[in-house]
Amino acid sequence: MKTSILIIEDNQQNLYLATYLLEKHDYRVLQATNGREGLSVAEREKPELILLDIQLPEMDGYTVARELLRSTVVPIVAITSHAMAGDKKKALDAGCTGYIEKPINPDTFIQQIAECLQG
C-alpha cells in the first residue's frame, strides 16, 4: 500500500508541484486548500504525514497544527515561506515535527519527505 501524505496548501502552484513530485515517487497524495478542510481530510483519511502551509485562509497553519495534535500523532511538517528568525521555532512550538522552506527545491524535496517519514 502506498504511503499517504496530506498537503494542506492554498496556493495552486505550490500544491501542484508538491503533488507532482510526491506522486512521481509513488506516494498517495491527499489535498486540502484550507485549514478546516485539512482537519476534515486528516480525520477521515489518516495520512502518514501532513505537509502544512502556515499562511492559510480561515485558520492559519499554527492553529491547524495545534488542532491536529488533539486527534493524531502523525508527523506534521510546516512548508512555508516564513523564513525569518524565530519562524521555525514558532512552527515547532505549535506542534510541527519538521520545517521546509518555500520555494521547495525539487532536487531535495523527496529526500526531505523521506527523512520526515522516518522520524
Image (spheres, helix red, strand yellow):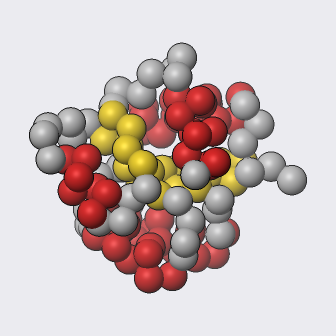
Q: Is residue 85 visible?
A: yes
**Residue extending furthest right?**
1
Q: Is residue 33 visible?
A: no
Q: Position of residue 55 (x, y in %)?
A: 25, 51
Tell me what residue is drawn at x 65 percent, y 59 percent.
Answer: 48
Which corner quadrant of the image does residue 59 belong to? bottom left
The relative height of residue 104 versus residue 117 in the rendered view (above or below) is above
Q: Position of residue 96 (x, y in %)?
A: 39, 58
Tell me what residue is drawn at x 56 percent, y 65 percent.
Answer: 74
Tell me what residue is drawn at x 29 percent, y 65 percent.
Answer: 94
Q: Position of residue 41 (x, y in %)?
A: 56, 68
26 and 93: which is toward the camera: 93
The relative height of residue 108 versus residue 45 in the rendered view (above or below) is above
Tell me what residue is drawn at x 53 percent, y 34 percent.
Answer: 112
Which corner quadrant of the image does residue 24 belong to? top right
The relative height of residue 19 versus residue 96 in the rendered view (above or below) is above
**Image-based side of 89 in relation to 117, left or right:** left
